[in-house]
Amino acid sequence: MYHYLPHLIGKPNALKPAIKYSKGRLGASIVMGIPTIKRDVDSYLTKTLISLVESLTTEERADCLIVVFCGEPWDIPYCQSIATLISTKMSEHVNSGLIEIISPPAEFYPNLDNLPATFGDTVERVKWRTKQNLDYSFLMMYAKRRGTYYVQLEDDIVTKTGYFSTMKNFALNQKSNEWMLLEFSSLGFIGKLFKSKDLPIVVEFFLMFYRDKPIDWLLDHLLSVKVCNPEKDSKHCQRSVSELRRRFKPSLFQHVGTHSSLKGKVQKLKDRDFGKGVVRNSHFNPNADVSTTLKNHQRFTLDKAYQGENFFWGILPKKDDLVIFEFNPPVSVEKYLFRSGNTEHPGDKFYNTTVEVLPNDHVEKLDGPLDNKERQNAFPRTDDGFLILNHFSHETGLAEGTIGSALGEIHTLRLRVEAPSDTWVILSEIYIKATPR
């Protein structure tokens, strides 16, 4: 850091907040960073915080941290007033540790009056985006030890109910851990989620070029530098970057502000994906090999549904069609929930469909008697040794229940169609809760 900000040498306090309202919450799943500065016209900060907090469940409020960063280090009274406003209007959440307010010291910033002009921007704009890069960097450095993931937001957004668990489960359900960025909005630097352990390299890259380009451009360059091979073509580069940068749709955040923090700039950008569809109830399901005899429609695959990225859409179920979840390794299943149909296609449900399991200790004994007579009496058994637990409801399209430890570890769970259907089928929610090992 001192290579890029040499003025900080000998100033250890320059990396500590000048203002800090904090209960010291640690171990959050997601830390949300919200930078804010003075706006000449409207302030959206309070509405943004209300939208974020009111869209959280009680459990989610205990599992996250919202850090408001007041980027006016030369106007301490203003930052104090912001802290007082938030502490008054949202006292419950400040007192619980959900919301923190910080402001950086003025000495963190170098002289911003003699910056090189780039891209034909005005002196005022160059100074504004350069300081913005430093604001983001300070905020990320502050947040990096507070949680597992960090998501960058802005102070003029609204969100969808369920956004927190959707982000968390989308991150946890990634098959490969080679990603560096998950995006939950298509706009600028909104809804960008990083692993906290990656923040040091992200910040270092930003500080290398903080004078040169806007923050979202620098992020693009960082990803390219990491994986693009100069000896390969642009298509290879794009494919490589797509492994690092993964997009969730529909967007979870919408930009609502029209007046930018840059004086005189009107910002009318809207995320077109925000209004498309509803947030799916995605879950962190146990590792499983998933397969189905149903043909999927377009990109609506079972694999993506299991990961919470999309729903599964199957074409005209026939008798004995299967949806299979083979756990690897076998797991003890506490409960399960399968929801079919959705708001746009409420009739595309599973009809005449059972939920069945194959306990692990039955795998090599499918032609023999069950070890436990009580289990045998409790559940009907299929010809191939599966126990029938439940049926989908014709009215709700839902199948849910508890299993607990009575059946031991489960090798396979499946859905089996007992009669042909004249409608397609949507599996919009898959939730299999396994007992931790």
Image (tube, rainbow, N blue to C red):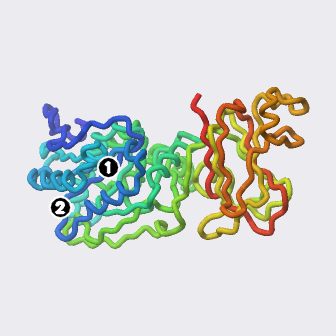
Residue 141, position as x, y percentages in the image: 29, 40
- The residue positioned 22% from the left and 69% from the top of the image is 42
Secondary structure, mark 2, is: loop
- The residue positioned 63% from the left and 42% from the top of the image is 335
Disc with the residue nearer the chain's start (2 vs 1): 1
Classify 10 Å Cα crowding around label 1: few (below 14), some (14-19), many (20 and above). Answer: many
Foreground: 369 or 43? Answer: 369
The quarter of the rendered structure image containing the C terminus is top right
- The residue positioned 44% from the left and 59% from the top of the image is 161
Residue 382, position as x, y percentages in the image: 86, 43
Residue under label 2, please give it: 38
Residue under label 1, please give it: 33
Secondary structure, mark 1, is: strand
Any part of residue 224 in sight:
no
Label 2 is placed on what type of residue?
Lys
- Real-space Cα separation, disc 2 to disc 1, in angstroms: 17 Å
Residue 3, position as x, y percentages in the image: 24, 37
Q: Is residue 189 toward the left or the right of residue 385 in the image?
A: left
Residue 417, position as x, y percentages in the image: 81, 55
Classify 10 Å Cα crowding around label 2: few (below 14), some (14-19), many (20 and above). Answer: some
Foreground: 31 or 248? Answer: 31
Q: Is residue 116 toward the left or the right of residue 379 in the image?
A: left
